[in-house]
Amino acid sequence: MARKKKGWTPKQGKWSKEGLKEAVRHVKCGGMSKLKASKMYNIPRTTLIRRLKTMDLDSPATKPTVLAINDEEALVGHILRMEERGFGLTITDVRKLAYEIAVRSGRKHCFNNDKKSAGYDWWQGFRDRHPYLPVCIPEGLSAARSSMLNPNVISAYFQKLGSFMDKLNIKEKPQQVFNADETGLSTVHDPSKIVGKRGKKSVHSKTSRERGENVTALCCVNAEARVLPPMLIFKGQRVSQALMGNTPANTLFACSKSSFIDSDLFNNWFQKLFIPNLPPQRPVLLILDGHSSHITVDLLETAVSDQIEMFCLPPHTTHWTQPLDRSVFGPLKRSYNLCCEAFLRQNPGSLLI
Protein backbone atom coordinates (compact mmCIF):
# COMPACT_ATOMS: atom_id res chain seq x y z
CA MET A 1 0.00 0.00 0.00
CA ALA A 2 1.41 3.37 -1.05
CA ARG A 3 2.29 5.75 1.73
CA LYS A 4 0.22 8.91 1.75
CA LYS A 5 2.50 11.88 1.31
CA LYS A 6 2.23 14.50 3.99
CA GLY A 7 1.98 17.99 2.56
CA TRP A 8 4.37 20.76 3.58
CA THR A 9 2.90 23.67 5.51
CA PRO A 10 4.77 26.92 6.19
CA LYS A 11 5.72 27.23 9.85
CA GLN A 12 3.63 29.89 11.54
CA GLY A 13 5.51 32.27 13.82
CA LYS A 14 4.18 32.73 17.36
CA TRP A 15 4.49 36.49 17.37
CA SER A 16 2.13 39.26 16.30
CA LYS A 17 2.50 42.26 14.01
CA GLU A 18 1.82 44.55 16.97
CA GLY A 19 4.64 42.91 18.95
CA LEU A 20 6.99 43.30 15.99
CA LYS A 21 6.19 47.01 15.67
CA GLU A 22 6.76 47.55 19.41
CA ALA A 23 10.09 45.68 19.27
CA VAL A 24 11.25 47.77 16.30
CA ARG A 25 10.18 50.98 18.09
CA HIS A 26 12.14 50.05 21.23
CA VAL A 27 15.28 49.22 19.22
CA LYS A 28 15.07 52.25 16.92
CA CYS A 29 13.94 54.88 19.42
CA GLY A 30 14.55 53.47 22.89
CA GLY A 31 18.04 52.10 22.41
CA MET A 32 17.04 48.58 23.48
CA SER A 33 19.29 45.79 22.25
CA LYS A 34 17.97 43.46 19.56
CA LEU A 35 18.47 40.44 21.81
CA LYS A 36 16.46 41.95 24.69
CA ALA A 37 13.67 43.13 22.35
CA SER A 38 13.43 39.70 20.71
CA LYS A 39 13.08 38.00 24.12
CA MET A 40 10.60 40.56 25.42
CA TYR A 41 8.22 40.17 22.44
CA ASN A 42 8.96 36.50 21.70
CA ILE A 43 10.30 37.25 18.21
CA PRO A 44 13.26 35.25 16.81
CA ARG A 45 16.35 37.45 16.83
CA THR A 46 17.14 36.71 13.16
CA THR A 47 13.58 37.66 12.21
CA LEU A 48 13.83 40.94 14.10
CA ILE A 49 17.18 41.76 12.47
CA ARG A 50 15.78 41.00 9.00
CA ARG A 51 12.65 43.11 9.58
CA LEU A 52 14.77 45.99 10.90
CA LYS A 53 16.81 45.93 7.68
CA THR A 54 13.82 45.79 5.35
CA MET A 55 11.38 47.70 7.60
CA ASP A 56 8.73 45.24 6.43
CA LEU A 57 6.40 45.27 9.43
CA ASP A 58 3.18 44.08 7.78
CA SER A 59 4.06 40.72 6.19
CA PRO A 60 2.62 37.73 8.09
CA ALA A 61 4.75 35.59 10.38
CA THR A 62 5.19 32.79 7.85
CA LYS A 63 7.87 31.71 5.45
CA PRO A 64 7.64 34.00 2.38
CA THR A 65 6.12 32.52 -0.76
CA VAL A 66 8.43 31.42 -3.57
CA LEU A 67 6.86 33.87 -6.01
CA ALA A 68 6.63 37.54 -5.16
CA ILE A 69 3.12 38.84 -4.49
CA ASN A 70 2.95 40.71 -7.81
CA ASP A 71 4.22 37.63 -9.71
CA GLU A 72 1.60 35.45 -8.06
CA GLU A 73 -1.10 37.99 -8.92
CA ALA A 74 0.12 37.97 -12.53
CA LEU A 75 -0.13 34.16 -12.58
CA VAL A 76 -3.70 34.33 -11.27
CA GLY A 77 -4.46 36.86 -14.00
CA HIS A 78 -3.07 34.52 -16.68
CA ILE A 79 -5.16 31.62 -15.35
CA LEU A 80 -8.40 33.63 -15.32
CA ARG A 81 -7.70 35.21 -18.71
CA MET A 82 -7.06 31.83 -20.34
CA GLU A 83 -10.13 30.29 -18.68
CA GLU A 84 -12.31 33.09 -20.08
CA ARG A 85 -10.99 32.28 -23.56
CA GLY A 86 -11.61 28.55 -23.27
CA PHE A 87 -8.09 27.43 -22.30
CA GLY A 88 -8.59 25.38 -19.15
CA LEU A 89 -5.13 25.13 -17.57
CA THR A 90 -4.37 21.90 -15.73
CA ILE A 91 -2.53 21.75 -12.40
CA THR A 92 0.57 20.67 -14.35
CA ASP A 93 0.24 23.70 -16.66
CA VAL A 94 0.00 26.06 -13.67
CA ARG A 95 3.04 24.47 -12.00
CA LYS A 96 5.08 24.88 -15.18
CA LEU A 97 4.03 28.52 -15.52
CA ALA A 98 5.06 29.10 -11.89
CA TYR A 99 8.50 27.64 -12.65
CA GLU A 100 8.89 29.96 -15.65
CA ILE A 101 7.97 32.99 -13.57
CA ALA A 102 10.38 32.02 -10.77
CA VAL A 103 13.26 31.56 -13.23
CA ARG A 104 12.53 34.83 -15.01
CA SER A 105 12.32 36.80 -11.76
CA GLY A 106 15.66 35.43 -10.55
CA ARG A 107 14.20 34.56 -7.14
CA LYS A 108 15.65 31.68 -5.17
CA HIS A 109 13.41 28.63 -5.50
CA CYS A 110 13.34 24.90 -4.79
CA PHE A 111 11.38 23.92 -7.91
CA ASN A 112 12.36 20.91 -10.03
CA ASN A 113 14.84 22.08 -12.68
CA ASP A 114 14.75 18.76 -14.54
CA LYS A 115 10.97 18.77 -14.96
CA LYS A 116 10.86 22.59 -15.14
CA SER A 117 7.92 22.57 -12.79
CA ALA A 118 6.91 23.79 -9.36
CA GLY A 119 6.22 21.06 -6.82
CA TYR A 120 2.83 19.78 -5.77
CA ASP A 121 3.35 21.23 -2.29
CA TRP A 122 3.72 24.67 -3.87
CA TRP A 123 0.47 24.07 -5.77
CA GLN A 124 -1.38 23.19 -2.56
CA GLY A 125 -0.24 26.41 -0.91
CA PHE A 126 -1.10 28.44 -4.01
CA ARG A 127 -4.58 26.91 -4.12
CA ASP A 128 -5.11 27.68 -0.42
CA ARG A 129 -4.08 31.31 -0.98
CA HIS A 130 -6.49 31.59 -3.92
CA PRO A 131 -9.53 29.46 -3.03
CA TYR A 132 -11.63 31.07 -5.78
CA LEU A 133 -9.66 29.09 -8.40
CA PRO A 134 -11.66 25.84 -8.72
CA VAL A 135 -10.19 22.51 -9.85
CA CYS A 136 -12.42 20.38 -12.09
CA ILE A 137 -11.86 16.68 -12.75
CA PRO A 138 -11.87 15.97 -16.52
CA GLU A 139 -13.72 13.08 -18.11
CA GLY A 140 -12.02 10.20 -19.90
CA LEU A 141 -11.31 10.95 -23.55
CA SER A 142 -13.83 8.60 -25.15
CA ALA A 143 -16.62 9.69 -22.80
CA ALA A 144 -15.65 13.33 -23.23
CA ARG A 145 -15.74 13.13 -27.02
CA SER A 146 -19.25 11.71 -27.02
CA SER A 147 -20.53 14.13 -24.36
CA MET A 148 -18.87 17.27 -25.72
CA LEU A 149 -19.90 16.76 -29.33
CA ASN A 150 -23.57 17.58 -28.89
CA PRO A 151 -25.69 20.49 -30.17
CA ASN A 152 -25.84 22.26 -26.80
CA VAL A 153 -22.05 22.33 -26.33
CA ILE A 154 -21.37 23.41 -29.90
CA SER A 155 -24.09 26.07 -29.78
CA ALA A 156 -22.72 27.41 -26.47
CA TYR A 157 -19.22 27.57 -27.98
CA PHE A 158 -20.32 29.60 -31.01
CA GLN A 159 -22.39 31.92 -28.81
CA LYS A 160 -19.36 32.51 -26.58
CA LEU A 161 -17.12 33.05 -29.61
CA GLY A 162 -19.64 35.45 -31.14
CA SER A 163 -19.91 37.45 -27.92
CA PHE A 164 -16.13 37.61 -27.64
CA MET A 165 -15.82 38.84 -31.24
CA ASP A 166 -18.51 41.47 -30.53
CA LYS A 167 -16.51 42.58 -27.51
CA LEU A 168 -13.41 42.96 -29.71
CA ASN A 169 -15.49 44.60 -32.48
CA ILE A 170 -14.03 42.35 -35.20
CA LYS A 171 -17.06 40.41 -36.47
CA GLU A 172 -16.97 42.34 -39.74
CA LYS A 173 -13.14 42.33 -39.95
CA PRO A 174 -12.12 38.90 -41.32
CA GLN A 175 -8.54 40.06 -41.90
CA GLN A 176 -8.12 40.17 -38.10
CA VAL A 177 -9.41 36.65 -37.35
CA PHE A 178 -6.86 33.82 -37.63
CA ASN A 179 -6.90 30.06 -37.15
CA ALA A 180 -3.76 27.96 -36.58
CA ASP A 181 -3.25 24.23 -36.24
CA GLU A 182 -0.60 21.61 -36.87
CA THR A 183 -0.77 18.41 -38.89
CA GLY A 184 1.62 15.55 -39.57
CA LEU A 185 2.90 14.41 -42.96
CA SER A 186 4.86 11.18 -43.35
CA THR A 187 7.65 10.43 -45.82
CA VAL A 188 5.78 7.17 -46.44
CA HIS A 189 2.60 8.38 -48.09
CA ASP A 190 -0.80 6.68 -48.03
CA PRO A 191 -1.15 5.01 -51.45
CA SER A 192 -4.33 5.44 -53.47
CA LYS A 193 -6.84 2.65 -53.89
CA ILE A 194 -5.92 0.22 -56.68
CA VAL A 195 -8.21 -1.52 -59.15
CA GLY A 196 -7.34 -5.25 -59.16
CA LYS A 197 -8.69 -8.70 -59.88
CA ARG A 198 -11.72 -9.69 -57.81
CA GLY A 199 -10.95 -12.35 -55.22
CA LYS A 200 -7.27 -11.46 -54.83
CA LYS A 201 -6.47 -11.23 -51.13
CA SER A 202 -4.00 -8.35 -51.34
CA VAL A 203 -2.70 -5.78 -53.78
CA HIS A 204 0.44 -3.68 -53.46
CA SER A 205 1.40 -0.13 -54.26
CA LYS A 206 4.88 1.31 -54.19
CA THR A 207 5.94 3.56 -51.33
CA SER A 208 9.29 5.19 -50.57
CA ARG A 209 10.13 3.16 -47.44
CA GLU A 210 8.66 0.60 -45.06
CA ARG A 211 8.54 3.14 -42.23
CA GLY A 212 8.52 6.87 -42.63
CA GLU A 213 9.61 9.95 -40.74
CA ASN A 214 6.97 12.37 -39.55
CA VAL A 215 7.12 16.06 -40.49
CA THR A 216 4.88 18.49 -38.60
CA ALA A 217 3.43 21.44 -40.49
CA LEU A 218 2.08 24.37 -38.45
CA CYS A 219 -0.32 26.26 -40.69
CA CYS A 220 -2.25 29.48 -40.21
CA VAL A 221 -4.93 31.25 -42.26
CA ASN A 222 -7.29 34.13 -41.65
CA ALA A 223 -11.02 34.44 -42.27
CA GLU A 224 -10.54 36.18 -45.63
CA ALA A 225 -8.49 33.16 -46.86
CA ARG A 226 -5.05 34.72 -46.55
CA VAL A 227 -2.47 31.97 -45.97
CA LEU A 228 0.59 32.64 -43.82
CA PRO A 229 3.87 30.83 -44.56
CA PRO A 230 4.02 27.47 -42.76
CA MET A 231 6.42 26.24 -40.11
CA LEU A 232 7.90 22.81 -40.89
CA ILE A 233 9.33 20.75 -38.02
CA PHE A 234 11.65 17.84 -38.83
CA LYS A 235 12.99 15.11 -36.60
CA GLY A 236 16.64 15.54 -35.58
CA GLN A 237 19.05 18.24 -34.49
CA ARG A 238 19.58 20.07 -37.80
CA VAL A 239 17.51 20.71 -40.89
CA SER A 240 19.19 19.66 -44.14
CA GLN A 241 19.46 22.35 -46.80
CA ALA A 242 18.10 19.81 -49.29
CA LEU A 243 14.76 19.88 -47.48
CA MET A 244 14.37 23.64 -47.79
CA GLY A 245 13.98 23.80 -51.57
CA ASN A 246 10.68 24.47 -53.37
CA THR A 247 8.93 25.63 -50.20
CA PRO A 248 6.67 28.70 -49.86
CA ALA A 249 8.49 31.98 -49.38
CA ASN A 250 9.40 32.77 -45.75
CA THR A 251 8.73 29.21 -44.55
CA LEU A 252 10.10 28.75 -41.03
CA PHE A 253 12.14 25.56 -40.51
CA ALA A 254 12.77 23.87 -37.17
CA CYS A 255 13.61 20.50 -35.69
CA SER A 256 12.91 18.54 -32.51
CA LYS A 257 13.62 15.08 -31.12
CA SER A 258 10.26 13.72 -32.21
CA SER A 259 9.36 16.23 -34.97
CA PHE A 260 6.39 17.28 -32.79
CA ILE A 261 5.80 20.85 -31.71
CA ASP A 262 6.63 22.03 -28.19
CA SER A 263 6.23 25.29 -26.29
CA ASP A 264 9.58 26.73 -27.43
CA LEU A 265 8.85 25.99 -31.09
CA PHE A 266 5.34 27.42 -30.87
CA ASN A 267 6.67 30.57 -29.18
CA ASN A 268 9.31 30.82 -31.94
CA TRP A 269 6.57 30.59 -34.59
CA PHE A 270 4.46 33.16 -32.74
CA GLN A 271 7.30 35.70 -32.49
CA LYS A 272 9.09 35.19 -35.82
CA LEU A 273 6.33 34.24 -38.24
CA PHE A 274 2.85 35.01 -36.90
CA ILE A 275 3.34 38.54 -35.53
CA PRO A 276 5.41 39.85 -38.51
CA ASN A 277 2.64 38.71 -40.91
CA LEU A 278 -0.24 40.37 -39.06
CA PRO A 279 -2.11 43.39 -40.41
CA PRO A 280 -1.53 46.68 -38.57
CA GLN A 281 -5.12 46.75 -37.23
CA ARG A 282 -5.71 45.57 -33.68
CA PRO A 283 -6.95 43.58 -31.87
CA VAL A 284 -6.28 40.27 -33.60
CA LEU A 285 -8.05 37.01 -32.72
CA LEU A 286 -6.18 33.69 -32.97
CA ILE A 287 -8.31 30.54 -32.65
CA LEU A 288 -6.43 27.44 -31.45
CA ASP A 289 -6.99 24.07 -29.89
CA GLY A 290 -6.17 23.71 -26.20
CA HIS A 291 -2.80 21.98 -26.61
CA SER A 292 -0.45 22.70 -23.69
CA SER A 293 2.41 23.51 -26.09
CA HIS A 294 0.66 26.82 -26.79
CA ILE A 295 0.95 28.13 -23.22
CA THR A 296 4.04 29.85 -21.82
CA VAL A 297 4.50 33.00 -19.78
CA ASP A 298 6.45 34.68 -22.60
CA LEU A 299 3.69 33.88 -25.08
CA LEU A 300 0.92 35.17 -22.81
CA GLU A 301 2.74 38.42 -22.07
CA THR A 302 3.64 38.97 -25.74
CA ALA A 303 0.03 38.39 -26.77
CA VAL A 304 -1.27 40.90 -24.21
CA SER A 305 1.29 43.58 -25.17
CA ASP A 306 0.60 43.10 -28.91
CA GLN A 307 -3.22 43.06 -28.51
CA ILE A 308 -3.50 39.47 -29.74
CA GLU A 309 -6.40 37.57 -28.20
CA MET A 310 -6.28 33.76 -28.21
CA PHE A 311 -9.49 31.75 -28.11
CA CYS A 312 -9.70 28.00 -27.55
CA LEU A 313 -11.83 25.49 -29.42
CA PRO A 314 -14.00 23.33 -27.13
CA PRO A 315 -12.06 20.28 -25.90
CA HIS A 316 -12.49 16.90 -27.61
CA THR A 317 -14.36 18.43 -30.56
CA THR A 318 -11.58 19.67 -32.84
CA HIS A 319 -12.20 16.86 -35.35
CA TRP A 320 -15.46 18.73 -36.05
CA THR A 321 -14.85 22.34 -35.01
CA GLN A 322 -11.26 23.01 -36.15
CA PRO A 323 -11.59 24.90 -39.47
CA LEU A 324 -8.22 23.76 -40.83
CA ASP A 325 -9.01 20.13 -39.99
CA ARG A 326 -12.40 20.34 -41.66
CA SER A 327 -11.50 22.16 -44.87
CA VAL A 328 -7.74 22.27 -45.50
CA PHE A 329 -5.77 19.34 -44.11
CA GLY A 330 -7.84 16.65 -45.86
CA PRO A 331 -7.29 18.06 -49.38
CA LEU A 332 -3.67 18.85 -48.47
CA LYS A 333 -2.91 15.24 -47.55
CA ARG A 334 -4.71 13.85 -50.61
CA SER A 335 -2.70 16.16 -52.88
CA TYR A 336 0.50 15.24 -51.04
CA ASN A 337 -0.15 11.51 -51.53
CA LEU A 338 -0.82 12.02 -55.26
CA CYS A 339 2.41 14.02 -55.65
CA CYS A 340 4.38 11.27 -53.87
CA GLU A 341 2.91 8.60 -56.15
CA ALA A 342 3.68 10.64 -59.27
CA PHE A 343 7.27 11.23 -58.11
CA LEU A 344 7.89 7.52 -57.46
CA ARG A 345 6.45 6.54 -60.85
CA GLN A 346 8.63 9.07 -62.64
CA ASN A 347 11.76 8.29 -60.59
CA PRO A 348 11.99 4.50 -60.06
CA GLY A 349 14.31 3.54 -57.20
CA SER A 350 14.31 7.03 -55.67
CA LEU A 351 13.38 7.93 -52.10
CA LEU A 352 11.27 10.88 -51.07
CA ILE A 353 13.78 11.83 -48.35
Image (spheres, rainbow, N blue to C red):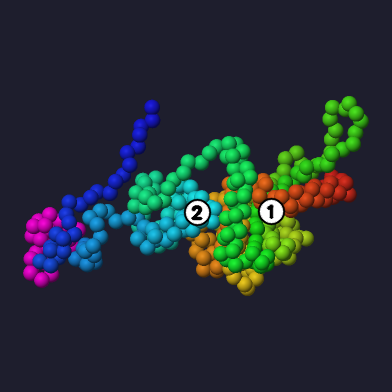
Q: Nearer the viewer, residue 321 or 258?
A: 321
Task: Look at the numbered disc 1 and give the secondary structure of its residue.
Answer: helix
Residue at coordinates 21% horizontally, 64% vertically from top-left?
Answer: 57
Q: Position of residue 184 (x, y in %)?
A: 69, 48
Amino acid type of the residue that numbered disc 2 sits on in the rendered structure: Glu
User: Residue placed farthest to the bottom in the image?
Assistant: 280
Q: Which mark is residue 45?
A: none
Front-most of 243 and 156? Answer: 156
Residue 92 within the segment the image draws in magenta: no
Tell me the number on the disc at residue 323: 1
Q: Would residue 2 be visible to someone looking at this image?
A: yes
Residue 353 visible from this viewpoint:
no
Q: Is residue 254 left or right of residue 337?
A: left
Q: Residue sitting at 84 percent across and 27 percent down? A: 201
User: Which element carries disc 2, helix, strand or loop?
Assistant: helix
Q: In this image, 113 relative to 260: left or right?
A: left
Residue at x 87% of width, y 38% of height:
194
Left or right: where 207 falls relative to 50: right
Magenta span: chief secondary structure:
helix
Q: Earlier in the sequence, mark 2 or mark 1?
A: 2
How many other residues sit within 10 Å of disc 1, few (<14), some (14-19) or many (≥20)?
some
In this view, the residue in front, 107 or 317, is: 317
Q: Is residue 249 above or below residue 259?
A: below
Give the magenta range: 27-49
Rendered-image quadrant of the N terminus: top left
The residue to which callout 2 is attached is: 83
For badge 1, the amino acid type reads: Pro
